[in-house]
Amino acid sequence: MERILVVEDSPEIASLMSLTLRMEGYGVVTASTGARALQLIAADKPSLILMDVMMPGLTGFQVAEQLKGDDATRDIPIIFVTARHEVDDRVQGLEVAVDYISKPFAVPELLARVRAALRMQKLQSELKASNDQLSKLAITDPLTGLYNRRGFDAQLEDELHRARRFRQPLGLVVFDLDRFKSVNDSYGHAQGDMVLQSFAEALLNLSRRVDKVARFGGEEFAVLLPNTDEVGAKIFAEKVRIAVEDTPISCPSCGLGKTISVTVSGGVAVLVPSTGANNDGHVPLSITRLAEGLFEMADAHLYRAKQGGRNRIETQSANEVEVARFASAANP
């Protein structure tokens, strides 16, 4: 049931509006002052507010301004119901309200404006939910629910800014499931997807809340480890490697009780921010260049892990200038 708050200091008018709205099936709560209205809204946000302008204490305009200044209440639609007919009052009211009804009002008009305001609020809520969903899809891998490369890149830039500002190390681990193509070839892509989802779950279970976990596509994943040095990053990466090696994955298409065993390799790159504000006398490096360098550094060590026999972790830590050289080497 949609709940409407009627804010009116006249008992007769408040009673008329309440009765009219209840007969139309709305839930109604009333307040005779602006201060009481704010208390009720804080306790349980209504779907719509019908509010007088001139009241004891806070005016309707003042209540509306407080509501619009709070992210939690700014989207609640307000209709002013008032005896003030001046153009300036209407203009001021429509700055913070969706509609403005003059007293005395006709009941059919009141109901029509209420329905219109609620309909508009519903459409706006649906549009916001749709936009939020689209925004989430734009940065999310559909198979695993992790960040995709686009979402991860934005998180990486934020964490690089933070690492530089607070002089904290930042770890990046790039993982690649070993010989994953053979899983798809032998058991099918549906089973391959189960392996990817299982690995994503393992990463989430072993990472901290502050860590950022992503799938870049195929069998490549990455984890961003804020305020983590090389020792801590290697410990995390080894935990992941061991967990994957020791946890067979169920294979329904293989037969009753059958499982698949996989392993993972990882490359760890840890940025150690410079001690000086300008990189010890050098021109400050761009965050974009640092991000590229950190990825190339982690990727180079992933390659070393693969070349070294797979199912292993290779690590390195470096300062900003050293990390940037990886970007220069990759993008001469």
Image (spheres, rainbow, N blue to C red):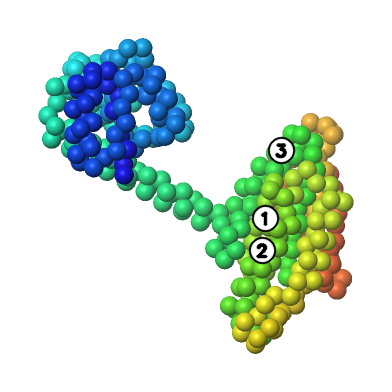
Count of residue discs: 3
Q: Is residue 54 visible?
A: yes
Q: Amino acid at mark 2?
A: Ala
Horizontal and vertical percent for residue 104? 14, 22
Question: Which residue is the site of mark 1?
Answer: 213
- Distance from the alpha carbon under mark 1 to that under mark 3: 18 Å
SS assignment at label 1: strand
**Quarter of the picture holding the C terminus:** bottom right
Residue at x 26% of width, y 25% of height: 80
- Distance from the alpha carbon under mark 2 to that under mark 1: 8 Å
Q: Amino acid at mark 3?
A: Arg
Horizontal and vertical percent for residue 304? 84, 66
Judge the density around disc 1: few (<14), some (14-19), many (≥20) Cα neighbours within 10 Å.
many
* Label pair 2/1, CB-CB below 8 angstroms: yes
Horizontal and vertical percent for residue 226? 74, 45
Residue at x 57% of width, y 66% of height: 143
Left or right of 143 in this view: 223:
right
Question: Which residue is the site of mark 2?
Answer: 200
Q: Which of the two discs, 3 and 2, labels the residue nearer the N terminus?
A: 3
Q: Nearer the viewer, mark 1 or mark 3?
A: 1
Q: Amino acid at mark 1?
A: Val
SS assignment at label 3: helix
Q: Is residue 185 visible?
A: no
Q: Looking at the rendered structure, which numbered label has been put on residue 162?
A: 3
